[in-house]
Image (cartoon, rainbow, N blue to C red):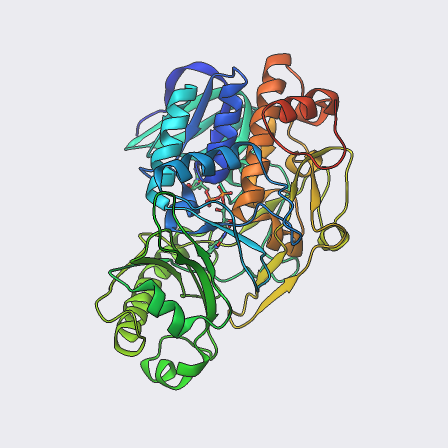
């Protein structure tokens, strides 16, 4: 049996585990602060769930005020230039008021280039498996790269794994699933549809006014986002055995006139942090989407000549959330609450896919339509040199229905990256980082912290 040695013989300033939207922003932000930064990703590509073909939700409040800026906006701007995005498009009806579809491959290419340009070391095919602690600090992490175990050392760590894998290994307290039951929102697999007539498909399927946009340099608007239910086809879908319930909801987005990203599959009672359950779900959802494609081709106008490509991996909505110095909860979102230690704002409402897989629930944000995200929700209890960002920050089950979306994930990722770099440079425990240092650094980096301008 091999004894693990240092995988790379140096101590990084900041180590970011997980290269979804959160980890990408965290690593970029840390490196731009001058931190020597390493980013770990078990898959051979970055993007995480953003690699599956999803709209970024959401930059603007119901009144059209933009509260998410910083790196998230910089990435969208770069994608608009390349034809990989159409900016923020108003959605006339729905629980979300503006949508930001992006092409997943162009997103991956753009952010890979940005990370390389910022000097981030990206380690693909490398998963974090354990943490070596010295008292209440992480000294090094054990990683599994291709057929090799090894250690990586850093001064400050950011858990952007979505599953709070690093926080768990560092013995920070975490909540797994819903308190009491441990239930988790269902998992889904996205599907890419090519050679589809998106206008006719939208006409046939959309039950609400779609979001239309015209790409830079083009003249024809395309339906970049629409949603609805399959209620009209309940009978045939039941016969085909695709779902275990009626009135299934779906969402589509695109930046191309002849392609759609289709969010229309679902499987309940899967623990997304369990590799065995996820493997089972991968097989089941690939089959569900194979059947859904055949149904769409046979029954829905616009799909007659389409091809259907289920994504390579399962999208996970929730697993673990760290217990931090503050737990953002439903009442904070309902009130549109303000915090002195805000590191950014969220404006996506609570969106809960119930663990039974059969229904969905939305809760609007109160106040002016945005809530502050406090720094303390990124700081786990009991570990001095760890920050948590993205899907697994310290939030209640319901608040997670808001913060798990990509715009807030990018906001917390950027904030964690800047904070980690500052903590590393000044040997400050994460819990003790003064807001008088962090907030101006975030503002200078282009982030928006809400109405209180912290100078
Ligand atoms: C079906 C579905 C539809 C959705 N629709 C939308 C939508 O329309 N708009 C929207 O904004 N949001 C949507 N979301 C939510 C959103 O996509 C995710 O919550 C968000 O992308 C999470 O980002 P993340 O970077 O925190 O986590 P992830 O995207 O999960 O990234 C985590 C990364 O960490 C890596 N990782 C995991 N474990 C380890 C480890 N041990 N060591 C190192 N790396 C590790 C993973 O490989 C992954 O790349 C949807 C989610 C699902 C499942």
Coordinates of residue 173 in the picture (x, y in percent): 64, 41
Residue reaching furthest front?
A: 219
Q: Position of residue 309 (x, y in %)?
A: 27, 58
Q: In this view, does 327 lie above or below 98?
A: above
At 38% from the left edge and 47% from the top edge, which residue is drawn? 215
Tell me what residue is drawn at x 35 percent, y 63 percent.
Answer: 285
Q: Along the line of sight, which residue is nearer the eye, 271 or 317?
A: 317
Specify whether 303 is left or right of 253: left
Q: Can residue 150 be seen in this view?
A: no
Residue furthest out toward the left:
305
**Depth check, front residue: 4 or 203:** 203
Q: Is residue 203 above or below residue 170?
A: below
Question: Residue 152, located in which quarter of the rendered image?
Answer: top left
Residue 126: percent from left, percent from top: 36, 33
Work out whether residue 416 can be spotted: yes
Q: In the picture, which quadrant includes the C terminus?
A: top right
- Specify the quadrant of the image occupied by residue 429: top right
Q: Nearer the viewer, residue 449 or 137?
A: 449
Vertical comparison of 85 with 253: above or below: above
Q: How many marks?
A: 0
Q: Is the N terminus in the top left, top right, bottom left or bottom right quadrant?
A: top left
Question: In terms of depth relative to the viewer, which is nearer, 293 or 70?
Answer: 70
Relative image position of residue 194 (x, y in whole percent): 26, 58
Left or right position of 154 against 418: left
């Amino acid at each position: 049996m091999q004894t693990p040695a240092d995988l790379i013989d140096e101590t990084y300033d900041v180590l970011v585990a997980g290269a979804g939207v959160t980890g990408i922003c965290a690593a970029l932000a840390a490196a731009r602060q001058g931190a020597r930064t390493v980013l770990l990703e078990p898959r051979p590509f970055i993007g995480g769930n953003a690699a599956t073909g999803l709209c970024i939700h959401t930059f603007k409040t119901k009144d059209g005020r933009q509260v998410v800026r910083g790196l998230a906006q910089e990435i969208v701007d770069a994608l608009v230039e390349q034809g990989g995005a159409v900016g923020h498009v108003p959605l006339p009806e729905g629980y979300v008021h503006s949508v930001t579809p992006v092409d997943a491959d162009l997103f991956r290419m753009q952010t890979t280039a940005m990370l390389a340009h910022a000097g981030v070391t990206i380690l693909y095919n490398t998963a974090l498996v354990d943490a070596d602690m010295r008292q209440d600090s992480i000294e090094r992490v054990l990683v599994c790269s291709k057929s090799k175990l090894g250690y990586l050392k850093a001064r400050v760590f950011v858990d952007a794994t979505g599953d709070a894998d690093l926080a768990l290994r560092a013995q920070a307290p975490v909540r797994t699933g819903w308190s009491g039951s441990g239930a988790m929102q269902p998992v889904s697999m996205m599907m890419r549809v090519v050679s589809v007539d998106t206008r006719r498909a939208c006409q046939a399927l959309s039950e609400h006014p779609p979001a239309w946009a015209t790409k830079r340099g083009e003249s024809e608007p395309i339906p970049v986002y629409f949603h609805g239910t399959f209620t009209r086809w309940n009978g045939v879908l039941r016969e085909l055995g695709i779902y275990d319930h009626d009135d299934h909801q779906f969402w589509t987005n695109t930046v191309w006139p002849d392609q759609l990203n289709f969010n229309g599959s679902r499987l309940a009672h899967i623990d997304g942090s369990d590799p065995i359950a996820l493997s089972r779900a991968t097989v089941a959802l690939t089959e569900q989407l194979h059947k859904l494609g055949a149904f769409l081709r046979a029954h829905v106008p616009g799909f007659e000549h389409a091809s259907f490509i289920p994504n390579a991996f399962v999208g996970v909505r929730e697993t673990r959330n760290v217990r931090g110095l503050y737990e953002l909860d439903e009442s904070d979102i309902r009130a549109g609450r303000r915090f002195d230690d805000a590191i950014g704002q969220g404006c996506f409402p609570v969106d809960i896919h119930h663990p039974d897989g059969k229904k969905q629930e939305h809760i609007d944000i109160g106040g002016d339509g945005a809530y502050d995200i406090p720094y303390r929700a990124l700081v786990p209890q009991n570990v001095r040199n760890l920050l948590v960002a993205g899907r697994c920050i310290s939030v209640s089950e319901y608040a997670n229905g808001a913060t798990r979306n990509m715009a807030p994930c990018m906001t917390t990722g950027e904030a964690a990256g800047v904070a980690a770099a500052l903590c590393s440079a000044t040997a400050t425990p994460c819990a003790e980082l003064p807001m008088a240092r962090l907030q101006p650094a975030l503002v200078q980096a282009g982030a928006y912290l809400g109405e209180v301008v912290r100078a």
